[in-house]
Image: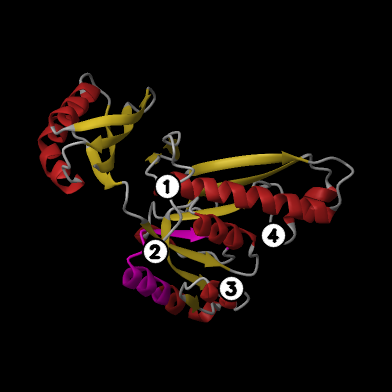
């Protein structure tokens, strides 16, 4: 039995859900999970539908036939094979907590993706990455070689067929040109102290100001630094009894969890960009406990 996901975005109007469900039913598909959202402010409609193709109809065949359904509604749509793993490229600098967390979740099957490589401007994690049988690419970045370094990164993206780039605390600002080329395909993570505490040691700055909430934000990367559409956020409470080092440790945990949840949402086709915001649908039953990677 083929399993698939259909994602649709279009202007909101009567009959969309009926047209989609009728098509899937007539094609021999049983809907197993469905989520939808009608944005009253923008007039946009979003839906994500998981289904079993009980007649074995492939997602490519379904995609071809769906064009006639989509055209009257002006739908932007895609069919996704549930068994197909998204190709993901990870980028990291010296802070390795998010990288370690992603590798662990990937190894146990909690993030069913193909990690096609890790790029870093430092060598700290080369051995660990290679020990996971994942290609490691060391690309040193200096102001005078930034354009050359980014060109090398794009070659790796193209050569590996990477569909998503995850900035797991990659501490280099990407150029506007690269952000445009990879629009909707780069996810970043950072602490949520901005704009109050910028620059070096934001957790130490927060400690000295007596901050009581430590948070993290994961978002799509755009040319506006740290201002792309938000996918996932979370917080942890702290008190006067915590030290500056505690703030850092707690922050690492929050960042790792938030980034992992954002990646999970993206690879399961649960995120839709909606202007400067996102629509993020809940996970389908069973998607947190898939088979381990082969």
Q: Nearer the viewer, mark 1 or mark 4?
A: 1
Q: Which residues are magenta?
A: 151-169
**Residue beneath the point at 35% across and 30% down:** 33
Q: Quadrant of residue 252?
A: bottom right
Residue wearing tag 1: 266
Q: Dot 1, how many residues are within 10 Å of its Cα: few (below 14), some (14-19), or many (20+)?
A: some
Q: Quadrant of residue 16?
A: top left
- Which circle marks residue 177 in the picture? 2
Q: Nearer the viewer, mark 2 or mark 1?
A: 1
Residue wearing tag 4: 199
- Taking depth in this image into account, of 13 and 30 the one nearest to the observer is 30
Whole-percent x, y for residue 91 in the image: 51, 66
**Gap between marks 2 and 1 measured at Cα:** 22 Å
Q: Is residue 144 magenta?
A: no
Q: Quick check: 59 above or below 159?
A: above
**Gap between marks 1 and 4 measured at Cα:** 29 Å
Disc nearer the start of the sequence (4/2): 2
| Quadrant, the N terminus | top left
Disc nearer the start of the sequence (2/1): 2
Q: For mark 4, give the secondary structure.
A: loop
Q: Nearer the viewer, mark 3 or mark 4?
A: 3
Are the residues flagged by discs 2 and 3 in contact, CB closer than 8 Å?
Answer: no
- Which circle marks residue 128 in the picture? 3
- Which circle marks residue 121 in the picture? none
**Residue beneath the point at 13% across and 29% down:** 26
Q: Quick check: 162 above or below 218?
A: below
Q: For mark 3, give the secondary structure.
A: helix
- Taking depth in this image into account, of 42 and 25 the one nearest to the observer is 25
């Amino acid at each position: 039995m083929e399993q698939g996901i259909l994602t649709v975005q279009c202007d909101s109007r009567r009959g969309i859900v009926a047209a989609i469900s009728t098509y899937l039913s007539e094609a021999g598909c049983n809907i197993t999970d469905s989520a939808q959202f009608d944005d009253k402010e923008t007039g946009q409609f979003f839906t994500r539908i998981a289904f079993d193709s009980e007649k074995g109809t492939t997602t490519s065949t379904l995609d071809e036939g769906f064009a006639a359904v989509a055209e009257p509604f002006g739908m932007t749509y895609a069919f996704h094979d549930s068994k197909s793993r998204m190709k993901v490229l990870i980028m990291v600098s010296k802070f390795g907590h998010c990288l370690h967390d992603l590798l662990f979740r990937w190894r146990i099957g909690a993030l069913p993706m193909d990690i096609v490589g890790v790029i870093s401007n430092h060598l700290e994690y080369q051995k660990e990455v290679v020990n996971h049988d994942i290609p490691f690419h060391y690309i040193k970045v200096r102001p005078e070689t930034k354009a050359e370094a980014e060109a090398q990164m794009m070659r790796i993206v193209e050569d590996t067929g990477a569909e998503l780039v995850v900035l797991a605390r990659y501490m280099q600002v990407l150029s506007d040109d690269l952000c445009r080329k990879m629009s909707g395909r780069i996810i970043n993570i950072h602490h949520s102290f901005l704009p109050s505490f910028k620059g070096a040691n934001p957790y130490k700055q927060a400690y000295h100001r007596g901050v009581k909430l430590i948070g993290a934000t994961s978002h799509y990367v755009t040319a506006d630094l740290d201002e792309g559409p938000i996918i996932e956020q979370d917080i942890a409470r702290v008190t006067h009894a915590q030290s500056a080092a505690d703030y850092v440790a707690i922050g690492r945990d929050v960042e790792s969890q938030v980034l992992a949840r954002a990646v999970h949402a993206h690879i399961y086709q649960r995120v839709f960009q909606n202007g400067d915001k996102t629509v993020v649908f809940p996970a389908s039953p069973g998607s947190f406990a898939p088979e381990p990677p082969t």
